[in-house]
């Protein structure tokens, strides 16, 4: 039987491993540790609840949790660096075979019955997520969140810098660009990206296409399964209004997904 570990204890161990301070700040009375804030925000995404209900649920089960107002403040104040490092450490060692893709999260959660009654459509106001996904471990290695529409290729350099030991890089035709093939070629990374229609086959695209393998490229669809998993388990919407809160909520979904896979 698999041994279960308290979420707060697990987060406390991870923060200690990353050498983060015990408390979020050095001012005022220190009633709650950083691990309490992080575990509370993770419970919020796992249970798909509001800040008030997160406090109520955790207290009902006898767990230590900051008040809803403290969680609201820490959601904006905890630096993005901490969440990115937690995502990396929960992903574990990379197999080197990764895929990249993007998806969106709605900024509101309207009733579909209400939308049907008013002849409305699904809300277009969404948050863009680009992620690097390990095709063997099925975990998220790095994420980048934007509030404005941008092309998928804009996040390739950022995501690859956040991940080491990448050997195989898979992406759909939206990532077919000569500069991506060139960057991966000089880094020793084999790309499996199908060429776009009516595109000129240049030097580095041609070099990478020599080792094209349709079977390996077909595994790229696992990244879409990963997006589907976090949306089904933790919701396809976010409740925060500002960019700091949006990043925290989506990264918490990714961290919770990685933790659920062990």
Image (cartoon, rainbow, N blue to C red):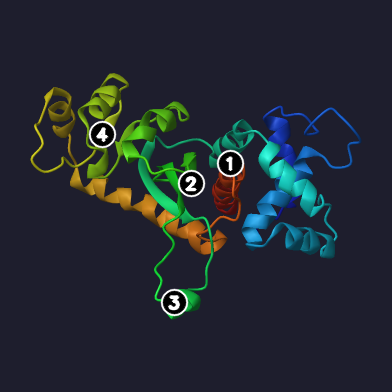
- Label 3 neighbourhood size at 10 Å, few (<14), some (14-19), many (20+)? few
Residue 90 image position (x, y, % from top left): 58, 41
Badge nearest the viewer, 3 or 1: 3
Badge nearest the viewer, 3 or 4: 3
Residues tagged 4 and 1 counted as in contact (Cβ below 8 A): no
Q: Is residue 107 left or right of residue 134?
A: right
Q: Please, what secondary structure does the residue beneath circle 1 have?
A: helix
- Label 2 neighbourhood size at 10 Å, few (<14), some (14-19), many (20+)? many
Which residue is at the front of the view, 139 or 254?
254
> What is the distance, in whole Å, between disc 3 and disc 1 at their CAs?
43 Å
Q: Please, what secondary structure does the residue beneath circle 4 have?
A: strand
Q: How many marks?
A: 4
Q: Specify whether residue 121 is in view.
A: yes
Label 1: which residue? 90
Which residue is at the front of the view, 120 or 216?
120
> What is the distance, in whole Å, between disc 2 and disc 3 at their CAs?
39 Å
Q: Specify whether residue 10 is in view.
A: no
> What is the distance, in whole Å, between disc 4 and disc 1 at their CAs?
25 Å
User: Where 74 sits versus 203, above or below?
Assistant: below
Q: Please, what secondary structure does the residue beneath circle 2 have?
A: loop
Which quarter of the picture shows residue 148?
top left
Residues tagged 1 and 2 counted as in contact (Cβ below 8 A): yes
User: Where 216 sits versus 107, above or below?
Assistant: above
Residue 1 image position (x, y, % from top left): 66, 60
Q: Residue at x 60, y 34 (%)?
A: 80
Residue 139 bears which disc, if any? 2
Q: In the rendered structure, which disc, 2 or 3, sits on the residue that comes first in sequence?
A: 3
Label 4: which residue? 191
């Amino acid at each position: 039987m698999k041994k279960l570990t308290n979420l707060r204890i697990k987060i406390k161990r991870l923060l200690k491993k990353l050498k983060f301070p015990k408390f979020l700040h050095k001012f005022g009375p220190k009633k709650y540790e950083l691990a309490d804030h992080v575990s509370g925000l993770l419970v919020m995404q796992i249970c798909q609840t509001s800040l008030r209900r997160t406090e109520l649920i955790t207290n009902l089960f006898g767990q230590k949790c900051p008040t809803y107002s403290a969680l609201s403040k820490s959601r904006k104040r905890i630096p993005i660096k901490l969440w990115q490092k937690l995502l990396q450490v929960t992903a574990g060692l990379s197999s080197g075979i990764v895929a990249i893709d993007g998806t969106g999260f709605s900024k509101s959660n309207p009733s579909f019955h209400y939308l049907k009654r008013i002849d409305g459509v699904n809300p277009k106001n969404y948050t863009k997520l680009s992620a690097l996904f390990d095709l063997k471990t099925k975990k998220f290695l790095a994420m980048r969140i934007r509030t404005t529409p941008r092309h998928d290729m804009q996040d390739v350099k950022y995501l690859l810098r956040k991940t080491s030991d990448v050997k195989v890089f898979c992406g759909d035709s939206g990532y077919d660009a000569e500069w991506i093939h060139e960057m991966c070629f000089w880094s020793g990374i084999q790309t499996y990206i199908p060429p776009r229609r009516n595109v000129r086959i240049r030097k580095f695209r041609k070099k990478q296409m020599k080792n094209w393998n349709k079977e390996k490229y077909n595994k790229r669809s696992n990244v879409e399964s990963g997006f589907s998993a976090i949306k089904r388990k933790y919701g396809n919407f976010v409740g925060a209004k500002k960019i700091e809160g949006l990043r925290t909520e989506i990264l918490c979904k990714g961290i919770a997904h990685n933790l659920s896979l062990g």
